[in-house]
Image: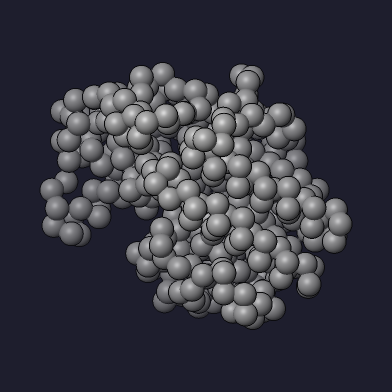
């Protein structure tokens, strides 16, 4: 296939692009590298079938050309990370909603399938031991900018499903749960690379809040493998799927696990949310996916453990530090 990846120079996009190339597909990337990086796709640029355009999905005329030349669109372009969401709510809302609107409108003209990347953030304050795709979505008040990301991604999902139902545009919606792996940056608040970087540098491992909030972690290889299987399955069209891990862990326990696995002398310290993100910040106490839907359709079962994820991230960071001459 000829694949177009918006935001393809980001962490997940780069891993997905590599997997598509490995499968014999052609990959075109458009990315404004505001949160993505050339470093993520550096190894791909010499490969046959890969091309990258540095521009924004807001460039409608360029996007029209790119859509005309592709067989499927993987729409990853979005604001990423809690810190960016809190600091730049206008950018978050505009990037997520306007960008998605442009992609869907252009795709609908040619009935080009779209894989829309959403997020576990949409579940917000939802109750239950696990989050299921058909469950209610409960967000905080509009006065808390932290929820703008979740709200904008919910609108994206509504819009994609409207195009599917009203204009017969093939869409697949994926809600990713804390996808982690080599090459991810901790710059925007991603917890595992931040913890690993701090542990390797001998710096304090900073836990935000009381650390009792729980998450699951998904290795990017497990996520990408699931995405490729969904794309090949006709039963995925018009549906929403959680992709996540099975092991639930508190952020506090994760910090100590990173410290132990990497044999670090770093202390684990706790930072109030107000100091990390400003007054009034609200967090999700629990974020655990129900995976029964994707398991039933494609037999999804994540292969990588939390320990695997930490060690893979650490190996990549050590390699990067060695190349730059920084301390291991």
- 197 with respect to 84 (left or right): left
Residue lying at 31% horizontally and 40% vertically, measured from the top left: 194
Q: Residue at x 59, y 79 (%)?
A: 62
Nearest the eye: 167 or 92: 92
Residue 117 lies, in percent from the top left, at 61, 51
- Which quadrant of the structure image shows residue 290? top right
- Viewer-side residue, 112 vs 42: 112
The vertical placement of 291 against 285, above or below, is: below
Q: Quadrant of residue 186?
A: top left
Residue 5 in view here: yes
Number of numbered callouts drawn: 0
The answer, for residue 219, to whether it is visible in the render is no
Is 84 situated left or right of 194 in this image?
A: right
Compared across the picture, whether 288 is left or right of 160 comes to left
133 relative to 203 in the view: left or right:
right
Q: Residue 48: x and y, percent?
A: 50, 78
Instruction: Tell me the residue at 64%/29% (across/down).
Output: 138
Which residue of the protein is positioned furthest toward the front in this rendering?
143
Type of colouring: one colour
Quarter placement of the N terminus: bottom right
Q: Position of residue 296 (x, y in %)?
A: 74, 35
């Amino acid at each position: 296939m000829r694949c177009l990846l918006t935001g393809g120079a980001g962490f997940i996009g780069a891993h997905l692009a590599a997997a598509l190339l490995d499968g014999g597909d052609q990959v075109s990337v458009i990315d404004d590298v505001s949160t993505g990086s050339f470093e993520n796709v550096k190894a791909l640029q010499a490969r046959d079938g890969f091309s990258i355009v540095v521009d924004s999905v807001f460039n409608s005329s360029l996007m029209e050309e790119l859509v005309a030349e592709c067989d499927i669109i993987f729409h990853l372009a979005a604001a990423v990370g809690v810190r960016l969401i809190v600091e730049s709510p206008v950018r978050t809302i505009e990037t997520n909603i306007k960008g998605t609107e442009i992609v869907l409108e252009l795709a609908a003209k040619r009935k080009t399938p779209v894989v829309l990347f959403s997020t576990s953030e949409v579940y917000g304050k939802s109750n239950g031991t696990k989050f299921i795709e058909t469950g209610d979505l409960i967000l905080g008040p509009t006065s808390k900018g932290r929820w703008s990301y979740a709200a904008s991604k919910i609108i994206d999902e509504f819009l994609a499903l409207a195009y599917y139902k009203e204009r017969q545009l093939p869409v697949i919606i994926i809600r990713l749960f804390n996808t982690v792996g080599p090459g991810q940056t901790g710059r925007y608040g991603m917890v595992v690379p931040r913890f690993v970087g701090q542990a390797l540098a001998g710096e304090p491992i900073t836990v935000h809040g009381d650390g009792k909030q729980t998450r699951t972690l998904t290795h990017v290889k497990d996520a990408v493998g699931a995405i490729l299987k969904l794309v090949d399955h006709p039963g995925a069209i018009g549906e929403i799927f959680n992709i996540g891990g099975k092991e639930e862990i508190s952020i506090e326990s994760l910090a100590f696990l990173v410290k132990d696995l990497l044999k670090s002398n770093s202390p684990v310290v706790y930072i109030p949310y107000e100091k990390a993100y400003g007054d009034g910040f609200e967090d999700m106490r629990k974020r655990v996916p129900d995976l029964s839907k994707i398991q039933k359709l494609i037999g999804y079962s994540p292969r990588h453990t939390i320990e695997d994820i930490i060690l893979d991230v650490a190996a990549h960071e050590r390699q990067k530090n060695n190349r730059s001459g920084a301390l291991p």
